[in-house]
Amino acid sequence: IGFWGIVAEIWAIIDVATKPDSYYINFPNE
């Protein structure tokens, strides 16, 4: 795993912890 892989994983953990599930249900893939 490279540097950005680690950054993305940490960001994902923080993102999931701070945003409600409804955010992902209504959020299209970009």
Image (cartoon, rainbow, N blue to C red):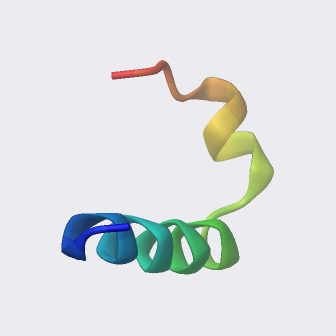
Seen in the picture, residue 12 relative to 18 is either above or below; the reply is above
Q: Position of residue 20 (x, y in %)?
A: 72, 59
Residue at the outermost left position? 3
Seen in the picture, residue 14 relative to 27 is either above or below; the reply is below
Identify which residue is drawn at 23% across, 66% down: 4
Quadrant of the image for the N terminus? Answer: bottom left
Residue 3's quadrant in the figure? bottom left
Residue 14's quadrant in the figure? bottom right
From the viewer's side, name the closer residue of 24 and 3: 3
Q: Position of residue 19 (x, y in %)?
A: 62, 65
The answer to whether residue 24 is left or right of residue 1 is right
Q: Position of residue 21 (x, y in %)?
A: 78, 50
Identify which residue is drawn at 60% across, 75% down: 13
From the viewer's side, name the closer residue of 3 and 23: 3
Q: How many marks?
A: 0
From the viewer's side, name the closer residue of 23 and 14: 14
Q: Position of residue 24 (x, y in %)?
A: 64, 39
The answer to whether residue 9 is left or right of residue 21 is left
Residue 25's quadrant in the figure? top right
